[in-house]
Image (cartoon, coloured by chain):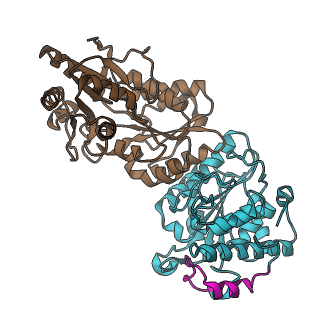
């Protein structure tokens, strides 16, 4: 299907319309992963509402012409790069590259690598990620760069909850408030699951709100699968920028959200549906923008 | 054989500090980050002159590398500063993904490299960093010979688009590179011409190689000394032209013999012109505490070791 990049960047405020977009993105996710029989559907599905909200409503951004510096635009960094299917679908659906390119996900010679990279020049991707724990530092650097350039736009970053087990996250957590990086909104996807099981079983994170508050962040909590609430939280987060502290959103989601048999388990973190499972999943996800 | 008088005794890290300060004045996009070693890296002059462009990140090198990578988005040219060990081994994955693979224009500036760090001992004396960095696709690796050249190299890497690793050191060392000797990344310098043996050196050992050449001359051996200040991209033409003339080579580096400059040269030679080569390098071991001179002697990196290696390789021609 064809679409207009210019239209894609006009903020969508209608909740039902955003949910329709999210449904298409969820279809894209399971179809990408199914086609190549690899990839990470669980976390991607859980974050489809957030990506939709950011790219179609909250962020000020210009898909074309694409440039790395993104001056006078809001920037987004995906730190948990394994949920690339939701990132790619969102970028394509918002006009960064042709939607049909989603069919090349994880194939040889594709710009849509297993984990996102700048190496292949895919528009919309400003950092390689996949090895966990690095994206918050990068987002902080980009936020500092904006400040030095007199650019009052914001930087967003997304992290998995399991990813918070990486030490570099806490180096960054200490640094950002100390340096008053208050043009940064970081989001943690609290789906409670990681490859080996529940986060609480693998390595519990304890009281995350207390931890981020203690590090000096402004902390908001939300449900990442409630579009109306999510939009409200993101707007509130924007209102809290520029006040001397970075903003953290602790966002509860359900891994596999939207596909019943992928929910309530860590099993679908990194496996692909077979033909039958694909059809079962697609039956639950209305096609709203046209499949690629 | 032309000679290089000792102009002064200065540490190469001060050359970096002076270069960084000059860059700060010349290019407003240059920013600097340091992990609690501002004085050791001689970054304090930059910090004082340009506080708004200096980031003290604390003892958190992984975060420093990531923040530096992010700063490039928006056009900054970040220079990170810490010891060579903490600039490479400690943060290898951060450099690999967020800087090298991502193709970010970060300048990784590493002091206190090699044995000549001295008394702090093996925990801080990294001898593997050149190998680690040259293995990363797209990484430029520069190891200047003295204070003046470190100053020049600091300016040069800022103008060189893409990730760079600049290695320098702690001790006061002879300054012998004339300030007007042109420096170009990837362009080796033939410091003395000779016909019998090629001595290829980098970093602190360039001076030792020049001393060895003088000793060899007394024994009637004509040595050509090449300052291979850029390990990657390597000036293959300069290496091949020299060995075409001399037919043998000694590589001299303050690094493990595995993976460093000597191996980079060996790869060129075995591919294009198989040539007898001897390594003056650390023999696959860690270092220890001691003075720089004591350590170079004990680990076989001193002038007599280069002379001995030259004679050995000559015998293999």
Q: Colour of chain A?
A: cyan
Residue B148 image offset from top left, x and y in percent = 40, 21
What span is in magenta? A262-286
Q: Colour of chain B?
A: brown
Q: Quadrant of the N terminus of chain B?
A: top left
Q: Quadrant of residue B300?
A: top left
Q: Is residue B260 left or right of residue A176?
A: left
Q: Is residue A283 magenta?
A: yes
Residue nearest the viewer, comparing A49 with A184: A49
Q: Quadrant of the C terminus of chain B?
A: top left
Q: Is residue B127 magenta?
A: no
Residue A209 image offset from top left, x and y in percent = 60, 69
> How many labels sit on residues?
0
Q: Is residue A207 left or right of residue A121?
A: left
Residue B65 image offset from top left, x and y in percent = 50, 48
Residue B311 image offset from top left, x and y in percent = 13, 27
Q: Is residue B207 visible?
A: yes
Residue A107 position (above or below residue B303): below
Report the predominant secondary structure element of the magenta stretch: loop
């Amino acid at each position: 299907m064809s679409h207009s990049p210019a239209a894609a960047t006009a903020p969508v405020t209608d909740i039902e319309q955003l949910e329709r977009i999210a449904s298409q993105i969820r279809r894209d996710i399971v179809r990408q992963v199914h086609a190549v029989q690899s990839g990470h559907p669980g976390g991607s599905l859980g974050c489809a509402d957030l990506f939709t909200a950011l790219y179609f409503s909250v962020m000020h951004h210009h898909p074309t012409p694409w440039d790395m510096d993104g001056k006078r635009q809001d920037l987004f960094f995906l730190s948990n790069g394994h949920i690339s299917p939701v990132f790619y679908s969102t970028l394509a659906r918002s006009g960064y590259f042709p939607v049909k390119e989603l069919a090349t996900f994880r194939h040889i010679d594709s710009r849509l690598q297993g984990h996102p990279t700048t190496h292949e020049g895919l528009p919309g991707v400003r950092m390689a990620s996949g090895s966990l724990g690095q994206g918050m530092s990068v987002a902080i650097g980009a936020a500092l760069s904006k400040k030095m350039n007199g650019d009052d736009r914001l930087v967003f970053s997304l992290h998995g909850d399991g990813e918070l087990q990486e030490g570099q996250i806490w180096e960054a957590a200490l640094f950002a408030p100390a340096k008053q990086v208050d043009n940064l909104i970081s989001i943690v996807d609290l789906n409670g699951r990681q490859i080996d099981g529940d986060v609480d079983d693998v390595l519990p994170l304890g009281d995350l709100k207390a931890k981020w508050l203690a590090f000096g962040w402004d902390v908001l909590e939300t449900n990442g699968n409630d579009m109306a609430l999510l939009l409200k939280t993101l707007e509130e987060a924007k209102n809290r920028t520029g006040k001397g502290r970075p903003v953290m959103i602790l966002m509860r989601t359900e891994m596999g959200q939207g596909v019943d048999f992928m929910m309530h388990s860590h099993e679908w973190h990194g496996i692909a549906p077979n033909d039958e499972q694909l059809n079962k999943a697609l039956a639950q996800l209305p096609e709203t923008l046209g499949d690629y | 054989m032309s000679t290089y008088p000792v102009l002064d005794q200065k540490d190469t890290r001060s050359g970096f500090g002076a270069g960084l300060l000059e860059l700060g004045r010349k290019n407003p996009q240059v920013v600097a980050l340091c992990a609690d070693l501002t004085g050791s890296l001689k970054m304090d002059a930059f910090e004082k002159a340009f506080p708004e462009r200096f980031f003290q990140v604390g003892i958190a090198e992984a975060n420093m590398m990531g923040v530096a990578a992010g700063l490039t988005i928006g056009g900054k040219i970040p220079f990170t500063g810490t010891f060579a060990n903490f600039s490479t081994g400690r943060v290898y994955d951060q450099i690999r993904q967020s800087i090298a693979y991502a193709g970010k224009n970060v300048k990784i500036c590493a002091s206190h490299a090699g044995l000549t760090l001295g008394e702090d001992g093996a925990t801080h004396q990294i001898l593997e960093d050149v190998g680690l960095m040259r293995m990363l696709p797209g990484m430029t690796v520069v190891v200047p010979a003295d204070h003046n050249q470190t100053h020049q190299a600091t300016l040069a890497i800022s103008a060189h688009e893409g990730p760079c690793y600049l290695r320098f050191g702690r001790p006061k060392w002879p300054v012998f590179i004339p300030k007007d000797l042109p420096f170009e990344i990837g362009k080796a310098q033939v410091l003395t011409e000779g016909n019998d043996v090629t001595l290829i050196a980098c970093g602190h050992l360039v001076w030792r190689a020049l001393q060895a050449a003088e000793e060899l001359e007394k024994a009637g051996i004509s040595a050509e000394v090449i300052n291979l200040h850029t390990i990657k991209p390597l000036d293959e033409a300069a290496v091949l032209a020299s060995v075409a003339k001399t037919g043998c080579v000694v590589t001299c580096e303050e690094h493990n013999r595995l993976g460093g400059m000597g191996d980079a040269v060996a790869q060129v030679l075995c591919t294009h012109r198989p040539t007898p080569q001897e390594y003056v390098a650390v023999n696959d071991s860690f270092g220890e505490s001691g003075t720089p001179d004591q350590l170079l002697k004990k680990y076989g990196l001193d002038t007599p070791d280069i002379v001995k290696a030259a004679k050995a390789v000559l015998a293999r021609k």
